[in-house]
Amino acid sequence: MRAIDSSFCIDLSNGDPGAAAKASELSGSGERVGIPAPALTEFLIGAFTRGGRRLAQALELVSSLEVLDTTEQIAVEAARLGGECARRGQPVGSLDLLIAASAIHHRATLLSRDSDFARIPGLTLEVY
């Protein structure tokens, strides 16, 4: 399974060639693709801000994705990961921790261009 970050959705919406190539590869693979709920929120904030055609395109994109809910177990794991990163002097934002914990929980590779995710232990990250 692949979990996609908001950066991937934004880049795909903006016509980024790397994101477009990865989306094409994923659509032909038959692999499950999900988006952690916090990443969905991050992506849709921008779409709702812009409205119109941009919002319609964003909603169409996410309609084909499996939304990975944030459960209590995932929230606790995100907090544990956050504490571990902070102890190492490498703090990570709360939404990124929730996204990473969701990917880890679902045994998914996280697809993102956000370098903050590389600091999170136990996360399998793919940069496009």
Image (cartoon, grey):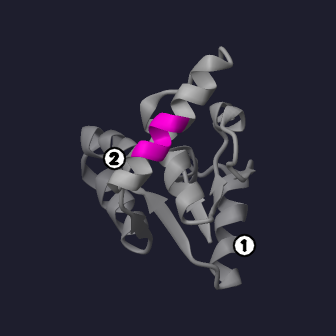
Magenta-colored stretch includes residue 78? yes
Q: Amino acid at mark 1?
A: Glu
Would you say 17 lies left or right of 62 here? right
Q: Position of residue 8 (x, y in %)?
A: 58, 50
Magenta-colored stretch includes residue 8? no
State the mark number for residue 25.
1
- From the viewer's perspective, is the residue at label 1 or at label 2 nearer? 2
112 versus 97 height, above or below: below
Look at the image and give the residue range highlighted in magenta: 76-80
State the mark number for residue 120.
none
Would you say 18 lies left or right of 63 here? right
Graded by Cα atoms within 10 Å as few (under 14), some (14 to 19) or many (20 or more), the crowding at tag 1 reads few
Instruction: Name the outermost residue toward the top.
Output: 89
Q: What's the residue at 72%, 63% (across, down)? A: 21
Q: Position of residue 2 (x, y in %)?
A: 62, 66
Q: Position of residue 118 (x, y in %)?
A: 72, 37
* Residue situated in front as seen by the camera: 105 or 64: 105
- Report which residue position mark 2 lands on: 41
Q: Position of residue 90 (x, y in %)?
A: 65, 19
Graded by Cα atoms within 10 Å as few (under 14), some (14 to 19) or many (20 or more), the crowding at tag 2 reads some
Q: Earlier in the sequence, mark 1 or mark 2?
A: 1
Name the element at disc 2. Answer: helix
Q: Amino acid at mark 2?
A: Thr
Q: Quadrant of residue 3?
A: bottom right
How many tags in the picture? 2
Q: What's the residue at 66%, 60% (across, down)? A: 20
Compute the Cα span from label 1 to label 2.
Answer: 25 Å
30 versus 67 height, above or below: below
